[in-house]
Image (cartoon, rainbow, N blue to C red):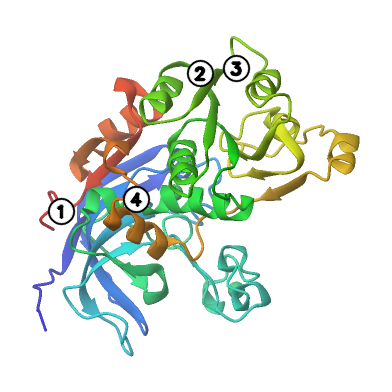
Amino acid sequence: MARYEIPQTMKACVLTGPNAFEIREDVPVPVPGPEEVLCRIGGVAICGSDPGVFDGHLAGEWPPSYPFIAGHEWAGRVVALGEGVTKFRVGDRVAGEAHKGCGHCRMCLEGRYTLCLNYGKPDAGHRHYGFITQGAYAQYCVFHVKSCTPLPDEISYREAAMCDTGGVALHGVEIAGIIPGSTVAVIGPGPIGMMAMKLAKALGAARVIVVGRGSRLASAQRLGCDDAVDFTKADPVQAVRLLTDGLGVDACLECSGANGTVSQAVRMCRKGGHAVLLGVPAVEHDEPIPFKYIAHNEIMLSGSRANPNVGWKLLNMIKAGSISVKEMVTHTFPLEEMAKAMDVFVGRKENVMKVVIYPNGGEQA
Ligand SMILES: [Zn+2]
Ligand SMILES: [Zn+2]
């Protein structure tokens, strides 16, 4: 079995308070407990939810306290094993996952562990890496084996860091029940919407209509959507209906979280269609929805949370070439340049889509 020199301390991006972080060199390297592995982080992508964790508006929950290390869209290498680990060997490459359910509540037993009834209770075995549990903006991090998926050698860390975003999209696509030959609308061509579009196509959707605006809508066209609707120029529901002979789409995937889009998603659906909400609004708000339209047309409306049970599927698809994620990562930065990376990501500068941080210098980690 391979052996790796493990230092006592490591470099990490440490949140010290709301809107405050430091790159520290003296953070103790964590020690894996039972069924946990210590991973050297190869690459970690900035998530759309990270700015909210960094700015501290959810402090007390995400993160529960300071100091805290965020980051959950990671891939890396197992460098040490905790007690009782049989799933991995030292040296294995893995892709990570943010959620780890308690494993014994009703939702976990059904495999729906992102809905764990013991959410936020570490004593019950629940983990939410990078939100509640220490995360991956560091050279090393400890993860439960359940949160690690074997990573094929052919897939780079940079690509594997897309497993979270891609997985969120794939879970929504699965809930929508997208079938070959179907017509799909995607609202919001951000990273999740873009992956949802790619996955719908890969699963055989005949036509994917993307609703958005500006440079991201242009990116969706470049990356293969069949029709693009600019909601600043046309009513998006009418436009989608016009493109579908007045029928509406089989499935609509709401990936923006923007105000007013729930009703739009529902009204874009054909009779018996399925609207799935993957987008997360910045703050909770109530939205009017067309009661009679939903009832009389048997529209299904579903929520979709995170990426349960999809990591291996996505990795197999990437490995087989049935989906490509390379062009999704537009920027990479070393951990030391976290402030710059965040600035580019949050400010949507330089046509950014996804940003990957390299805590250990690059792909060779
Ligand atoms: Zn994420
Ligand atoms: Zn549970």
Query: Mark 1 or mark 4, which is nearer the start of the sequence?
Result: 4
- The residues bearing labels 3 and 1 have C-alpha atoms spaced at a distance of 42 Å
The three-letter amino acid code for the residue at tag 4 is Ser
* Mark 4 nearby-residue class (10 Å; few <14, some 14–19, many ≥20): some
Q: Report the front residue among 302 and 321.
A: 321
Q: Which residue is mark 3?
A: 231
Label 2: how many residues lie within 10 Å, few (<14), some (14-19) or many (20+)?
Answer: some
Which class describes the residues within 10 Å of circle 1: few (<14), some (14-19), or many (20+)?
many
Q: Which image quarter holds the N terminus?
A: bottom left
Dots 2, 3 in contact, CB < 8 A: yes
Q: Residue 53 location, x and y as percent?
A: 47, 45
On screen, residue 23 versus residue 351, left or right, reads: left
Please tell me the numbered disc located at residue 213: 2
Question: Front-most of 78 and 24?
Answer: 78
Mark nearer the viewer, 1 or 2: 2
From this view, report whether residue 327 is shown above or below residue 37.
Answer: above
Q: Secondary structure at mark 4?
A: loop
Q: Is residue 313 left or right of residue 211?
A: left
Can you give x and y, in whole percent of width and height, for residue 195 in the image? Answer: 43, 42
Answer left or right for 104 relative to 360.
right
Precedes in sequence: disc 2 or disc 4: 2
Under circle 1, the secondary element is: loop
Which residue is tagged 4? 322
Q: Tell me the tag on residue 360.
A: 1
The part of the image, by quadrant, that contains residue 184 is top right
